[in-house]
Image: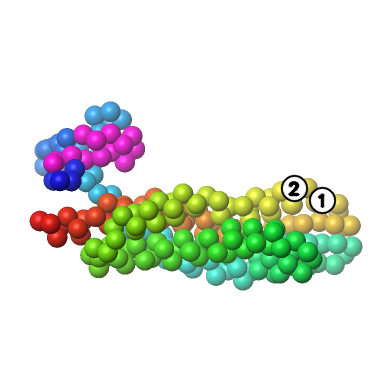
Amino acid sequence: MSAKQLGLVGCHDCHLLSRQQRPASGQAAYCPRCGATLHLRKPNSIARTWALLTAAFIFYIPANVLPITVTSSLGSKQSDTIMSGVIYFLLHGSPEIAVVIFTASIFIPICKLVVMAYLLVSVQRNSRWRPRDRTQLYRVVEGIGRWSMVDIYVVTILVALVKLGFFADIEAGPAALYFAAVVVISMLAAQSFDPRLIWDALEEKHE
């Protein structure tokens, strides 16, 4: 027996589980504790998540193709993408830093997008395959989303610290903005997805 079958609905804000109200026609039901609007499922969850996910995929391309830092040293300039930075640290004896940057800035963001796309497709196809594992997968994606900002933090610190005028200077490249957009939009996509949709297909089967 599920909460939905018992007429219970959870608040998205304070997570209070309360009895589903029967408001008048055209009126919304509200949480008795925090006053937020109650929904059995997040409104337009699939459409909103697809829209955000598509935007994140689009921004992911310039985030990795355009330079993320522009370094000036003694009058010469050098532009580096995320991948060229990884290669630089590998060739100069810092494989640990290269692994951290590759994992946080390239591997995790694309994995998040692919996993969210898989969850959306599985929900739209009414898949009943291993709902518990898919829910755990969603929780992992939602939890690690913020850690993808490590590359932006590094760029911000470098820009703030290296200001030596003609001798050395580091500026943020155009990819920094696109990369930040990918991280923020993918986090919003994870928030807009309702994991309870994963279990709805199983409930329909039992009914």
Quarter of image, res 62: bottom right
The one nearer the camera, 143 or 23, is 143
Give the secondary structure at mark 1: loop
Nearest the viewer among 45 and 165 is 45
Crowd tier of the residue under label 2, counting other residues whose Cα lies within 10 Å: few below 14, some 14–19, many 20 or above = few
Depicted 81 relative to depicted 5: above or below: below
For the point 21% across and 40% down, the residue is: 9
Image x and y of residue 185, in percent: 47, 56
Residue 16 vs 183, above or below: the answer is above
Q: In the visual, does 25 lie left or right of 39?
A: left
Magenta stretch bounds: 6-18
Which residue was labeled with disc 2?
A: 160
Please give the count of numbered marks on the rendered protein: 2
Residue sitting at 77 percent across and 69 percent down? 91
**Are the residues tagged 2 and 1 within 8 Å (C-beta)?**
yes
Is 100 on the left-hand or right-hand side of 54? right
Q: Which mark is residue 163?
A: 1
| Residue 67 visible in the current orientation | no
The answer to whether residue 198 is left or right of residue 154 is: left
Distance (Cα) linking label 2 and label 1: 7 Å
Across and down, in percent, residue 132 comes to 31, 55
Q: Amino acid at mark 1?
A: Lys
Q: Are there few (<14), some (14-19), or many (20+) residues within 10 Å of tag 1?
A: some
Q: Quadrant of the C terminus?
A: bottom left
- Check residue 8 for magenta coloring: yes
In the image, what residue type sits under mark 2?
Answer: Ala
